[in-house]
Amino acid sequence: MLKINQINHVAIICSDIEKSKTFNTEILGFKVQSVVDAQNTFAKAVEYQPDLILLCV
């Protein structure tokens, strides 16, 4: 069985970028690092933790 030691990047495809940003920042504690455009946001939990990319479709 494959053993995962750490996760560096997570991408989530969502239908509402604003709701997803609100949930991931206010509930999960991620901090927005950059907004690529109206449909793509890059966030980080804390230093040395996984990056989160929200992709709106």
Image (cartoon, grey):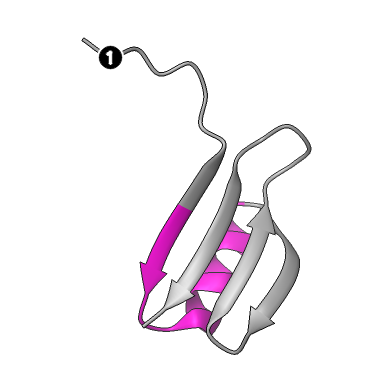
Which picture quadrant has residue 4? top left
- What secondary structure characterizes most of the magenta part? helix
Q: Is residue 21 located in the magenta-colored stretch of the structure?
A: yes
Q: Which residue is mark 1?
A: 2
The residue under the point 67% across, 78% down is: 36
* Residue farthest left in this picture: 1
SS assignment at label 1: loop
Query: Residue at left 78%, top 37%?
Result: 47
The residue depicted at 51 percent of the width and 32 percent of the height is 7
Q: In the rendered structure, which amino acid carries the disc numbered 1?
A: Leu
47 and 26: which one is in front? 47
Residue span colored magenta: 11-28
Horizontal and vertical percent for residue 17?
A: 50, 81
Residue at left offset 36%, top offset 83%: 57
Residue 28: image location, x then y, percent: 58, 52
Q: Quick one: quadrant of the N terminus?
A: top left
Residue 12 covered by magenta stretch: yes
Residue 25 position within the rendered picture, expressed as x and y whole percent measured from the top left: 64, 62
